[in-house]
Amino acid sequence: MSVPRKIAYNVIFSSSAKILSTIVALIGIGLITRYLGQEGFGRYATALAFLSLFGALGDWGIYQVATLRISRDKADERKVLSNAMGLRITVSLAVIIIAPLIIYILPYGKELKIALIFIAFSYAFSSFYQVIVGLFQKKLRMDLVTGSELIGKIIQVSLIVIGVMNDWGFYFIIITLLINMIINFTFVFLISRKFIKFKPAFDFTYWKNFLKQSIPIGLAALVTFIYFKADTILLSLMKPAEDVGTYGAAYKVIENISFFPAMIVGLTLPLLSYNIFKNREKFKNIVNKNFKVFLILVIPLIIGTFFLADGIIAIIAGPEFAESAIVLKIIIFASAFIFFGHLFTNILLSANLQKKLFIVLFFCAIFNITLNLILIPKFSYLATASISVATEFLVIMLTGFLIYRNLKFIPSSNKIIQIIISGVLMTLFLWFTQDINFFLRLLVSPMIYFGSLIILNVISKNEILSFVKKDAS
Protein backbone atom coordinates (compact mmCIF):
# COMPACT_ATOMS: atom_id res chain seq x y z
CA MET A 1 0.00 0.00 0.00
CA SER A 2 1.36 3.46 -0.90
CA VAL A 3 2.15 6.01 1.80
CA PRO A 4 -0.74 8.34 0.82
CA ARG A 5 -3.15 5.41 0.92
CA LYS A 6 -1.80 4.31 4.31
CA ILE A 7 -2.26 7.82 5.67
CA ALA A 8 -5.75 8.03 4.17
CA TYR A 9 -6.70 4.66 5.67
CA ASN A 10 -5.31 5.65 9.06
CA VAL A 11 -7.06 9.02 9.01
CA ILE A 12 -10.39 7.48 7.98
CA PHE A 13 -10.24 4.54 10.40
CA SER A 14 -8.73 6.55 13.25
CA SER A 15 -11.19 9.40 12.72
CA SER A 16 -14.10 6.96 12.77
CA ALA A 17 -12.77 5.25 15.91
CA LYS A 18 -12.06 8.60 17.54
CA ILE A 19 -15.50 9.94 16.66
CA LEU A 20 -17.08 6.87 18.23
CA SER A 21 -14.75 7.22 21.21
CA THR A 22 -15.70 10.89 21.53
CA ILE A 23 -19.40 10.05 21.44
CA VAL A 24 -18.86 7.42 24.14
CA ALA A 25 -16.76 9.89 26.17
CA LEU A 26 -19.44 12.60 25.91
CA ILE A 27 -22.04 10.09 27.09
CA GLY A 28 -19.74 9.45 30.06
CA ILE A 29 -19.39 13.19 30.70
CA GLY A 30 -23.18 13.55 30.56
CA LEU A 31 -23.57 10.82 33.18
CA ILE A 32 -20.87 12.32 35.41
CA THR A 33 -22.18 15.91 35.24
CA ARG A 34 -25.71 14.83 36.10
CA TYR A 35 -24.52 12.46 38.85
CA LEU A 36 -21.99 14.73 40.54
CA GLY A 37 -23.59 18.13 39.86
CA GLN A 38 -21.63 21.37 39.36
CA GLU A 39 -19.59 21.08 42.55
CA GLY A 40 -18.74 17.40 42.13
CA PHE A 41 -17.92 17.82 38.47
CA GLY A 42 -15.72 20.76 39.43
CA ARG A 43 -13.66 18.38 41.61
CA TYR A 44 -13.58 15.87 38.73
CA ALA A 45 -12.36 18.55 36.29
CA THR A 46 -9.69 19.59 38.79
CA ALA A 47 -8.52 15.98 39.07
CA LEU A 48 -8.22 15.75 35.27
CA ALA A 49 -6.21 18.97 35.23
CA PHE A 50 -3.77 17.35 37.67
CA LEU A 51 -3.50 14.34 35.36
CA SER A 52 -2.21 16.79 32.76
CA LEU A 53 0.08 18.40 35.37
CA PHE A 54 1.70 15.07 36.26
CA GLY A 55 2.01 14.33 32.56
CA ALA A 56 3.77 17.64 31.99
CA LEU A 57 6.11 17.16 34.96
CA GLY A 58 7.08 13.70 33.70
CA ASP A 59 7.10 14.40 29.98
CA TRP A 60 10.78 15.23 29.40
CA GLY A 61 10.19 15.01 25.63
CA ILE A 62 10.65 11.23 25.73
CA TYR A 63 7.76 10.35 23.43
CA GLN A 64 8.56 13.00 20.81
CA VAL A 65 12.28 12.23 20.59
CA ALA A 66 11.65 8.47 20.52
CA THR A 67 9.23 9.01 17.62
CA LEU A 68 11.70 11.23 15.77
CA ARG A 69 14.61 8.79 16.27
CA ILE A 70 12.82 5.67 15.13
CA SER A 71 11.65 7.60 12.04
CA ARG A 72 15.19 8.25 10.82
CA ASP A 73 17.06 6.11 8.25
CA LYS A 74 18.49 2.84 9.62
CA ALA A 75 17.11 3.55 13.09
CA ASP A 76 17.68 0.89 15.76
CA GLU A 77 14.03 0.73 16.84
CA ARG A 78 14.62 -1.80 19.63
CA LYS A 79 17.38 0.25 21.25
CA VAL A 80 15.42 3.51 21.01
CA LEU A 81 12.18 2.10 22.42
CA SER A 82 13.88 0.00 25.12
CA ASN A 83 15.77 2.98 26.50
CA ALA A 84 12.80 5.31 26.11
CA MET A 85 10.70 2.88 28.15
CA GLY A 86 13.41 2.53 30.82
CA LEU A 87 13.69 6.30 31.06
CA ARG A 88 9.91 6.67 31.19
CA ILE A 89 9.61 4.15 34.05
CA THR A 90 12.28 5.99 36.04
CA VAL A 91 10.67 9.40 35.56
CA SER A 92 7.16 8.08 36.28
CA LEU A 93 8.28 6.54 39.58
CA ALA A 94 9.80 9.88 40.55
CA VAL A 95 6.52 11.67 39.78
CA ILE A 96 4.50 9.13 41.80
CA ILE A 97 6.84 9.66 44.77
CA ILE A 98 6.72 13.46 44.51
CA ALA A 99 2.97 13.71 43.78
CA PRO A 100 1.74 13.10 47.37
CA LEU A 101 3.99 15.92 48.60
CA ILE A 102 2.44 18.32 46.09
CA ILE A 103 -1.06 17.12 46.93
CA TYR A 104 -0.52 17.43 50.69
CA ILE A 105 0.21 21.18 50.62
CA LEU A 106 -2.76 22.07 48.40
CA PRO A 107 -5.83 23.69 50.02
CA TYR A 108 -8.26 21.02 48.82
CA GLY A 109 -10.62 18.80 50.78
CA LYS A 110 -9.77 15.21 51.73
CA GLU A 111 -11.96 13.71 48.99
CA LEU A 112 -10.17 15.52 46.18
CA LYS A 113 -6.70 14.86 47.65
CA ILE A 114 -7.35 11.10 47.75
CA ALA A 115 -8.66 11.24 44.19
CA LEU A 116 -5.43 12.91 43.09
CA ILE A 117 -3.44 9.90 44.36
CA PHE A 118 -5.41 7.66 41.98
CA ILE A 119 -4.75 10.24 39.25
CA ALA A 120 -0.98 9.96 39.83
CA PHE A 121 -1.10 6.22 39.13
CA SER A 122 -3.30 6.86 36.09
CA TYR A 123 -0.55 9.15 34.79
CA ALA A 124 2.04 6.35 35.10
CA PHE A 125 0.14 3.96 32.82
CA SER A 126 -0.68 6.79 30.43
CA SER A 127 3.02 7.69 30.16
CA PHE A 128 4.08 4.07 29.47
CA TYR A 129 1.44 3.84 26.77
CA GLN A 130 2.53 7.08 25.11
CA VAL A 131 6.11 5.93 24.46
CA ILE A 132 4.91 2.93 22.44
CA VAL A 133 2.56 5.03 20.28
CA GLY A 134 5.55 6.44 18.35
CA LEU A 135 6.18 2.97 16.89
CA PHE A 136 2.63 2.83 15.52
CA GLN A 137 3.03 6.31 14.06
CA LYS A 138 6.14 5.24 12.17
CA LYS A 139 4.45 2.08 10.89
CA LEU A 140 1.36 4.13 9.94
CA ARG A 141 -0.79 1.80 12.06
CA MET A 142 -2.50 4.31 14.33
CA ASP A 143 -5.70 2.44 13.53
CA LEU A 144 -4.57 -0.17 16.06
CA VAL A 145 -4.04 2.50 18.71
CA THR A 146 -7.37 4.25 18.19
CA GLY A 147 -9.13 0.89 18.13
CA SER A 148 -7.61 0.02 21.51
CA GLU A 149 -8.55 3.44 22.88
CA LEU A 150 -12.15 2.93 21.76
CA ILE A 151 -12.33 -0.41 23.57
CA GLY A 152 -10.88 1.16 26.72
CA LYS A 153 -13.31 4.08 26.58
CA ILE A 154 -16.33 1.77 26.13
CA ILE A 155 -15.25 -0.27 29.16
CA GLN A 156 -14.71 2.90 31.22
CA VAL A 157 -18.11 4.39 30.39
CA SER A 158 -19.79 1.02 31.01
CA LEU A 159 -18.24 1.04 34.49
CA ILE A 160 -19.43 4.65 34.99
CA VAL A 161 -22.98 3.56 34.12
CA ILE A 162 -22.77 0.74 36.69
CA GLY A 163 -21.26 3.10 39.27
CA VAL A 164 -23.97 5.74 38.78
CA MET A 165 -26.76 3.16 38.90
CA ASN A 166 -25.40 1.75 42.17
CA ASP A 167 -24.40 5.15 43.59
CA TRP A 168 -20.78 4.13 44.17
CA GLY A 169 -19.68 7.74 44.49
CA PHE A 170 -16.95 10.12 43.35
CA TYR A 171 -14.00 7.81 44.05
CA PHE A 172 -15.34 5.10 41.76
CA ILE A 173 -15.69 7.62 38.91
CA ILE A 174 -11.99 8.48 39.36
CA ILE A 175 -10.99 4.80 39.53
CA THR A 176 -12.63 4.16 36.13
CA LEU A 177 -10.06 6.54 34.64
CA LEU A 178 -7.21 4.46 36.11
CA ILE A 179 -8.79 1.28 34.73
CA ASN A 180 -9.05 2.89 31.28
CA MET A 181 -5.34 3.83 31.31
CA ILE A 182 -4.34 0.28 32.34
CA ILE A 183 -6.43 -1.22 29.53
CA ASN A 184 -5.00 1.17 26.91
CA PHE A 185 -1.40 0.42 27.92
CA THR A 186 -1.95 -3.35 28.05
CA PHE A 187 -3.58 -3.54 24.63
CA VAL A 188 -1.04 -1.31 22.88
CA PHE A 189 1.93 -3.05 24.50
CA LEU A 190 0.71 -6.50 23.45
CA ILE A 191 -0.04 -5.35 19.89
CA SER A 192 3.40 -3.69 19.61
CA ARG A 193 4.99 -7.16 19.93
CA LYS A 194 3.75 -7.80 16.41
CA PHE A 195 6.29 -5.26 15.11
CA ILE A 196 9.16 -5.46 17.58
CA LYS A 197 9.90 -7.10 20.92
CA PHE A 198 11.61 -4.85 23.43
CA LYS A 199 12.02 -4.52 27.17
CA PRO A 200 13.06 -1.57 29.37
CA ALA A 201 16.77 -0.73 29.06
CA PHE A 202 18.87 1.45 31.36
CA ASP A 203 21.81 2.54 29.18
CA PHE A 204 22.82 5.71 31.00
CA THR A 205 25.26 6.77 28.28
CA TYR A 206 22.47 6.56 25.73
CA TRP A 207 20.13 8.39 28.13
CA LYS A 208 22.57 11.30 28.39
CA ASN A 209 22.59 11.80 24.63
CA PHE A 210 18.83 11.24 24.42
CA LEU A 211 18.07 13.79 27.16
CA LYS A 212 20.16 16.48 25.51
CA GLN A 213 17.64 16.42 22.68
CA SER A 214 14.53 15.65 24.71
CA ILE A 215 14.75 17.97 27.72
CA PRO A 216 14.04 21.18 25.73
CA ILE A 217 10.94 19.44 24.35
CA GLY A 218 9.97 18.33 27.86
CA LEU A 219 10.31 21.88 29.15
CA ALA A 220 8.17 23.01 26.21
CA ALA A 221 5.55 20.44 27.24
CA LEU A 222 5.60 21.81 30.78
CA VAL A 223 5.07 25.40 29.69
CA THR A 224 2.42 24.19 27.22
CA PHE A 225 0.59 22.66 30.18
CA ILE A 226 0.84 25.98 32.00
CA TYR A 227 -1.03 27.89 29.30
CA PHE A 228 -3.29 24.98 28.27
CA LYS A 229 -4.40 23.44 31.58
CA ALA A 230 -3.11 25.49 34.49
CA ASP A 231 -6.09 27.83 34.19
CA THR A 232 -8.35 25.06 35.55
CA ILE A 233 -6.07 24.59 38.56
CA LEU A 234 -5.84 28.35 39.15
CA LEU A 235 -9.63 28.58 38.90
CA SER A 236 -9.98 25.75 41.45
CA LEU A 237 -7.67 27.59 43.86
CA MET A 238 -9.35 30.99 43.49
CA LYS A 239 -13.02 30.19 42.89
CA PRO A 240 -15.60 27.64 44.16
CA ALA A 241 -15.85 24.16 42.64
CA GLU A 242 -19.12 25.17 40.92
CA ASP A 243 -17.19 27.65 38.75
CA VAL A 244 -14.67 24.95 37.85
CA GLY A 245 -17.58 22.68 36.91
CA THR A 246 -19.09 25.34 34.64
CA TYR A 247 -15.77 25.88 32.89
CA GLY A 248 -14.93 22.18 32.85
CA ALA A 249 -18.17 21.14 31.12
CA ALA A 250 -17.40 23.42 28.16
CA TYR A 251 -13.71 22.53 28.20
CA LYS A 252 -14.41 18.80 28.02
CA VAL A 253 -16.29 19.37 24.75
CA ILE A 254 -13.23 21.15 23.33
CA GLU A 255 -10.85 18.54 24.74
CA ASN A 256 -12.73 15.78 22.94
CA ILE A 257 -12.43 17.67 19.65
CA SER A 258 -8.69 18.33 19.92
CA PHE A 259 -7.81 14.74 19.02
CA PHE A 260 -8.21 15.60 15.31
CA PRO A 261 -5.19 17.90 14.94
CA ALA A 262 -3.06 15.77 17.27
CA MET A 263 -3.95 12.61 15.33
CA ILE A 264 -3.36 14.04 11.85
CA VAL A 265 -0.11 15.79 12.78
CA GLY A 266 0.97 12.67 14.70
CA LEU A 267 0.53 10.56 11.57
CA THR A 268 2.59 12.96 9.45
CA LEU A 269 5.31 13.83 12.03
CA PRO A 270 7.57 10.93 10.93
CA LEU A 271 7.18 12.10 7.30
CA LEU A 272 7.98 15.71 8.27
CA SER A 273 11.03 14.56 10.21
CA TYR A 274 12.20 12.35 7.33
CA ASN A 275 11.73 14.90 4.52
CA ILE A 276 12.60 18.26 6.04
CA PHE A 277 16.34 17.87 5.35
CA LYS A 278 16.12 15.38 2.45
CA ASN A 279 13.26 16.58 0.24
CA ARG A 280 12.25 20.17 1.00
CA GLU A 281 9.47 20.35 -1.62
CA LYS A 282 7.83 17.18 -0.35
CA PHE A 283 8.07 18.57 3.19
CA LYS A 284 6.31 21.78 2.13
CA ASN A 285 3.66 19.79 0.29
CA ILE A 286 2.87 17.70 3.40
CA VAL A 287 2.66 20.84 5.59
CA ASN A 288 0.40 22.69 3.14
CA LYS A 289 -1.97 19.72 2.85
CA ASN A 290 -2.19 19.58 6.65
CA PHE A 291 -2.86 23.32 6.71
CA LYS A 292 -5.64 22.98 4.14
CA VAL A 293 -7.30 20.10 6.01
CA PHE A 294 -7.21 22.08 9.26
CA LEU A 295 -8.66 25.17 7.59
CA ILE A 296 -11.50 23.07 6.15
CA LEU A 297 -12.22 21.59 9.61
CA VAL A 298 -12.00 24.66 11.86
CA ILE A 299 -14.42 26.89 9.93
CA PRO A 300 -17.52 24.69 10.42
CA LEU A 301 -16.32 23.87 13.94
CA ILE A 302 -16.38 27.55 14.95
CA ILE A 303 -19.60 28.40 13.10
CA GLY A 304 -21.52 25.33 14.23
CA THR A 305 -20.47 25.56 17.87
CA PHE A 306 -21.20 29.30 18.08
CA PHE A 307 -24.79 28.83 16.88
CA LEU A 308 -25.49 25.47 18.55
CA ALA A 309 -23.64 25.82 21.88
CA ASP A 310 -26.79 26.02 24.02
CA GLY A 311 -28.18 22.79 22.61
CA ILE A 312 -24.81 21.03 22.80
CA ILE A 313 -24.38 21.83 26.50
CA ALA A 314 -28.01 20.98 27.30
CA ILE A 315 -27.58 17.51 25.76
CA ILE A 316 -24.11 16.77 27.12
CA ALA A 317 -24.20 18.29 30.62
CA GLY A 318 -27.86 19.07 31.34
CA PRO A 319 -29.75 22.26 32.28
CA GLU A 320 -27.72 22.79 35.46
CA PHE A 321 -24.74 23.74 33.27
CA ALA A 322 -26.53 26.33 31.07
CA GLU A 323 -23.79 28.92 31.77
CA SER A 324 -21.26 26.58 30.18
CA ALA A 325 -22.74 27.45 26.76
CA ILE A 326 -21.34 30.97 27.05
CA VAL A 327 -17.91 29.54 27.88
CA LEU A 328 -18.16 27.13 24.93
CA LYS A 329 -18.91 29.97 22.49
CA ILE A 330 -15.71 31.69 23.61
CA ILE A 331 -13.37 28.75 23.97
CA ILE A 332 -14.23 27.22 20.59
CA PHE A 333 -11.94 29.84 19.04
CA ALA A 334 -9.08 28.53 21.18
CA SER A 335 -9.83 25.03 19.85
CA ALA A 336 -9.54 26.32 16.28
CA PHE A 337 -6.17 27.90 17.01
CA ILE A 338 -4.99 24.66 18.64
CA PHE A 339 -5.28 22.92 15.25
CA PHE A 340 -2.67 25.21 13.70
CA GLY A 341 -0.64 25.34 16.91
CA HIS A 342 -0.17 21.56 16.71
CA LEU A 343 1.00 21.83 13.11
CA PHE A 344 3.41 24.73 13.65
CA THR A 345 4.87 23.18 16.80
CA ASN A 346 5.59 19.89 15.04
CA ILE A 347 7.19 21.70 12.09
CA LEU A 348 9.63 23.31 14.52
CA LEU A 349 10.28 19.97 16.24
CA SER A 350 11.03 18.25 12.95
CA ALA A 351 13.48 21.08 12.14
CA ASN A 352 15.29 20.56 15.49
CA LEU A 353 14.29 24.05 16.67
CA GLN A 354 13.23 22.87 20.14
CA LYS A 355 15.10 25.57 22.04
CA LYS A 356 13.53 28.41 20.09
CA LEU A 357 10.13 26.76 20.44
CA PHE A 358 10.64 26.59 24.19
CA ILE A 359 11.32 30.34 24.41
CA VAL A 360 8.09 31.08 22.54
CA LEU A 361 6.00 28.71 24.67
CA PHE A 362 7.57 30.00 27.89
CA PHE A 363 6.58 33.55 26.94
CA CYS A 364 3.02 32.36 26.17
CA ALA A 365 2.85 30.58 29.54
CA ILE A 366 3.89 33.73 31.41
CA PHE A 367 1.33 35.71 29.40
CA ASN A 368 -1.41 33.19 30.32
CA ILE A 369 -0.59 32.87 34.01
CA THR A 370 -0.25 36.63 34.53
CA LEU A 371 -3.60 37.43 32.94
CA ASN A 372 -5.35 34.60 34.82
CA LEU A 373 -4.01 35.77 38.18
CA ILE A 374 -5.21 39.29 37.44
CA LEU A 375 -8.61 38.53 35.89
CA ILE A 376 -9.91 35.31 37.51
CA PRO A 377 -10.81 36.99 40.84
CA LYS A 378 -13.15 39.37 38.99
CA PHE A 379 -14.35 37.47 35.93
CA SER A 380 -13.94 33.79 36.95
CA TYR A 381 -14.43 31.27 34.13
CA LEU A 382 -15.13 33.98 31.54
CA ALA A 383 -11.56 35.16 32.12
CA THR A 384 -10.04 31.68 31.75
CA ALA A 385 -11.95 31.08 28.52
CA SER A 386 -11.01 34.43 26.95
CA ILE A 387 -7.37 34.14 28.02
CA SER A 388 -7.19 30.64 26.49
CA VAL A 389 -8.25 32.12 23.14
CA ALA A 390 -5.71 34.93 23.36
CA THR A 391 -2.92 32.54 24.36
CA GLU A 392 -3.55 30.03 21.57
CA PHE A 393 -3.63 32.86 19.02
CA LEU A 394 -0.33 34.16 20.38
CA VAL A 395 1.16 30.65 20.02
CA ILE A 396 0.35 30.37 16.32
CA MET A 397 1.54 33.91 15.61
CA LEU A 398 4.92 33.40 17.30
CA THR A 399 5.52 29.84 16.04
CA GLY A 400 4.50 30.98 12.56
CA PHE A 401 7.09 33.75 12.78
CA LEU A 402 9.75 31.22 13.82
CA ILE A 403 8.90 28.99 10.85
CA TYR A 404 9.20 31.91 8.45
CA ARG A 405 12.41 33.23 9.98
CA ASN A 406 14.23 29.89 10.18
CA LEU A 407 12.77 27.90 7.30
CA LYS A 408 11.86 30.76 4.95
CA PHE A 409 8.46 29.18 4.55
CA ILE A 410 4.88 30.06 5.46
CA PRO A 411 2.26 27.26 5.52
CA SER A 412 -0.55 28.11 3.12
CA SER A 413 -3.53 26.68 1.28
CA ASN A 414 -5.20 27.13 -2.07
CA LYS A 415 -8.97 27.57 -2.44
CA ILE A 416 -9.20 29.78 0.67
CA ILE A 417 -11.90 32.00 -0.90
CA GLN A 418 -14.02 28.94 -1.76
CA ILE A 419 -13.65 27.59 1.79
CA ILE A 420 -14.77 30.94 3.22
CA ILE A 421 -17.77 31.04 0.86
CA SER A 422 -18.79 27.58 2.09
CA GLY A 423 -18.54 28.84 5.67
CA VAL A 424 -20.71 31.87 4.84
CA LEU A 425 -23.42 29.62 3.37
CA MET A 426 -23.38 27.51 6.54
CA THR A 427 -23.62 30.68 8.66
CA LEU A 428 -26.61 31.99 6.69
CA PHE A 429 -28.44 28.69 7.14
CA LEU A 430 -27.89 28.67 10.91
CA TRP A 431 -28.76 32.36 11.23
CA PHE A 432 -32.13 32.06 9.47
CA THR A 433 -33.15 28.74 11.06
CA GLN A 434 -32.77 29.55 14.76
CA ASP A 435 -36.35 28.45 15.48
CA ILE A 436 -35.92 25.07 13.76
CA ASN A 437 -35.25 21.81 15.62
CA PHE A 438 -31.71 21.61 17.04
CA PHE A 439 -30.93 18.16 15.63
CA LEU A 440 -32.08 19.15 12.15
CA ARG A 441 -29.77 22.19 12.18
CA LEU A 442 -26.92 20.04 13.54
CA LEU A 443 -27.40 17.56 10.70
CA VAL A 444 -28.07 19.92 7.77
CA SER A 445 -25.52 22.69 8.46
CA PRO A 446 -22.38 20.53 7.90
CA MET A 447 -24.06 19.01 4.84
CA ILE A 448 -24.42 22.51 3.38
CA TYR A 449 -20.80 23.32 4.19
CA PHE A 450 -19.18 20.17 2.83
CA GLY A 451 -21.58 20.08 -0.11
CA SER A 452 -20.43 23.58 -0.99
CA LEU A 453 -16.80 22.47 -0.77
CA ILE A 454 -17.50 19.73 -3.33
CA ILE A 455 -19.42 22.04 -5.68
CA LEU A 456 -16.66 24.68 -5.49
CA ASN A 457 -14.02 22.02 -6.20
CA VAL A 458 -12.05 22.78 -3.02
CA ILE A 459 -10.58 19.26 -3.09
CA SER A 460 -9.24 18.43 -6.53
CA LYS A 461 -9.63 15.16 -8.39
CA ASN A 462 -5.86 14.59 -8.24
CA GLU A 463 -5.84 15.00 -4.46
CA ILE A 464 -8.56 12.36 -4.11
CA LEU A 465 -6.79 9.99 -6.52
CA SER A 466 -3.51 10.37 -4.61
CA PHE A 467 -5.15 8.53 -1.73
CA VAL A 468 -6.59 5.67 -3.73
CA LYS A 469 -4.07 4.94 -6.49
CA LYS A 470 -1.72 2.08 -5.78
CA ASP A 471 1.11 3.86 -7.57
CA ALA A 472 0.64 7.17 -5.78
CA SER A 473 3.89 8.90 -4.91
Image (spheres, grey):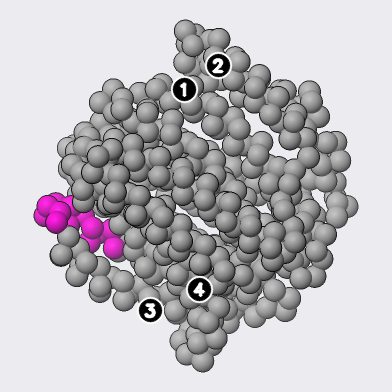
Task: Read off the magenta span.
Answer: 107-120
Q: 395 or 254, which is in the foreground?
A: 395
Pointers 4 and 3 in contact (C-beta within 8 Å): no
Q: Earlier in the sequence, mark 4 or mark 3?
A: 3
Q: CA distance from mark 4 to mark 3?
A: 18 Å
Q: CA distance from mark 2 to mark 1?
A: 9 Å
Task: Give the residue number, with chain letter if any, for mark 2.
Answer: 430
Task: Give the residue number, with chain letter if any, for mark 1.
Answer: 308
Magenta-span inclusion, residue 167: no
Three-letter amino acid code at the position of disc 1: Leu
Instruction: Name the residue furthest top.
Output: 435
Q: Earlier in the sequence, mark 4 or mark 2?
A: 4
Determine crowd level at label 4: few under 14, some 14-19, many 20+ residues with C-alpha closer than 10 A. many
Instruction: Name the residue furthest left.
Output: 110
Say which quarter of the image contains residue 122: bottom left
Pointers 1 and 3 in contact (C-beta within 8 Å): no
Nearest to the eye among marks 4 and 3: give it. Answer: 4
Task: Give the residue number, with chain letter if any, for mark 3.
Answer: 90
- Taking the spot 52% from the left edge, 50% from the top edge, the residue there is 394
- Taking the spot 12% from the left edge, 52% from the top edge, the residue there is 109
Pointers 4 and 2 in contact (C-beta within 8 Å): no
Three-letter amino acid code at the position of disc 2: Leu
Magenta-span inclusion, residue 119: yes
Q: At which x and y percent is residue 133?
A: 54, 62
Q: Is residue 266 visible?
A: no
Q: 390 or 444, which is in the foreground?
A: 390
Q: Is residue 428 visible?
A: yes
Three-letter amino acid code at the position of disc 3: Thr
Q: CA distance from mark 1 to mark 4?
A: 40 Å
- Taking the spot 28% from the left edge, 44% from the top edge, the residue there is 376
